[in-house]
Amino acid sequence: MANSKVSKELKDLYRVPDIINSVPNEVWEGVLSYLPSLSSSALRKSLGFKATTEDDHHRIWNYFFKSDSWLDTACISGVNPCLIGYDLNPLIYDKHSAFNVASEKNKKPKRLYLALIYGRDRSDAPVPSEFQSNELRELFYKSLQPWETRTTHDIVFANGARLNVSDIDQSAHNVSVPCPRQLVSRKLDGLHSAYLYWKDTEYRVQDIKPQDVTGIGKGFTKKNVSRIVALNWKHLPSGKVRQQVFCIAGMDRQTIAIKNDGKITSFEWRPEWKVFTENGWKSNILASIVKQRKAKRELQRKD
C-alpha cells in the first residue's frame, strides 16, 4: 500500500500532529472525498481544538459558508473575498452561535447584516472573467450555508442573518444595499464599520474608523448614511487603501460626489432628486419647483 506525504500547509490547516508524516493513499483519498463539503472551521470544531484567532476568523466565515471551495477558488483567481459591516464585531465574541438562535422574548432571530464583496485594489477594477461563468456561480451558492429566501440584493439565512451579495452578482462600481446604515454603528467618536478578508495573515476583524466613513453632508449620524455611504479600508494583500460606495439602487445618480485627490470626501444632493425607498418614492422635485417659482416671483417684484 503506497503512502502520501502530508504537506506542511495541510498540517497547519487541519492541525495534523507532527508525528504523522504520511498516510496510506486509500485512507487519504477517503479523507479528501469529505473535505470539500466541510469548512476548516467545522472540521476543527468537530475535532475539539481550542479556539484561536485563526479559528475565530474561520468561524465567522462559517456562519455563511459551509465549504471553503468558492472562497479558495476566488483567491486562486486573483481576488480576496471580504465581509463588510459593523456586525462583524459581535460575531468575534459569539463563541456559542448566539446569532443562530431566536431571542427568548420575541422568538425572532437577532439582526445580522453584512455585505460580501470581491476584494480588489480598486472598486472599479474588473472582476476576472471566469467569475461570470455559470460554473463558479453554482459553486458559490453550493458553498453557502442553507438559506431560506433571496431578495433582490440579499440572501436571508434560516437564522435571520442577511448577506448582501450584489457585488458577487453584478460586480458594479457601486454596491447596491437596501439600507446602507446597517453596515455602520454609532459610537461616541462617530460612525464605525468593520471588514474581514478571507485571506488575512492576522485573521482579525479590522475597524473602519469615522474618518473613513463618508455620507451625505458633514453629519456623523446614521441619517447621513441611510441611503449612501463610502467606506475606506486597507485592501489585502496589497496594503493599498481602497474606497467602496454602498448605496440604495440609483442613489449615485441623485447625488454629487465631492472628491479630493481622487477620494470621495462627501456627498451632496443634486438640485432635483428622486429615489425609491422602502416606503415608496421620495423626492424634492415638487419643493424644487416651488422654490424656483418663489425665486421667479421675487425677481419680478424687484423689476
Image (cartoon, rainbow, N blue to C red):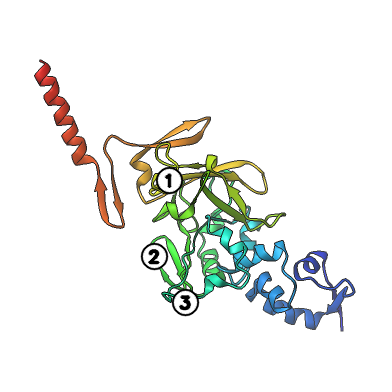
- Residue closer to the observer: 30 or 268: 268
Q: Which residue is mark 1?
A: 221
- First in sequence: mark 1 or mark 3? 3
Which of the two marks, 2 or 3, is nearer to us in this view? 3
x 45%, y 45%: residue: 229
Q: Classify 10 Å Cα crowding around label 1: few (below 14), some (14-19), many (20 and above).
A: some
Q: Position of residue 157 (x, y in %)?
A: 47, 71
- Does 255 sit above or below residue 96? above
SS at circle 1: loop
- Residue closer to the observer: 11 or 289: 289
Measure the C-alpha gap from mark 1 to mark 2: 27 Å
Residue 119 seen in this snapshot: yes
Q: Which residue is mark 2?
A: 151
Q: Position of residue 135 (x, y in %)?
A: 54, 66
- Does 144 sit above or below residue 118? below
Measure the C-alpha gap from mark 2 to mark 3: 27 Å
SS at circle 3: loop
Q: Position of residue 200 (x, y in %)?
A: 68, 55
Q: Which residue is mark 3?
A: 104
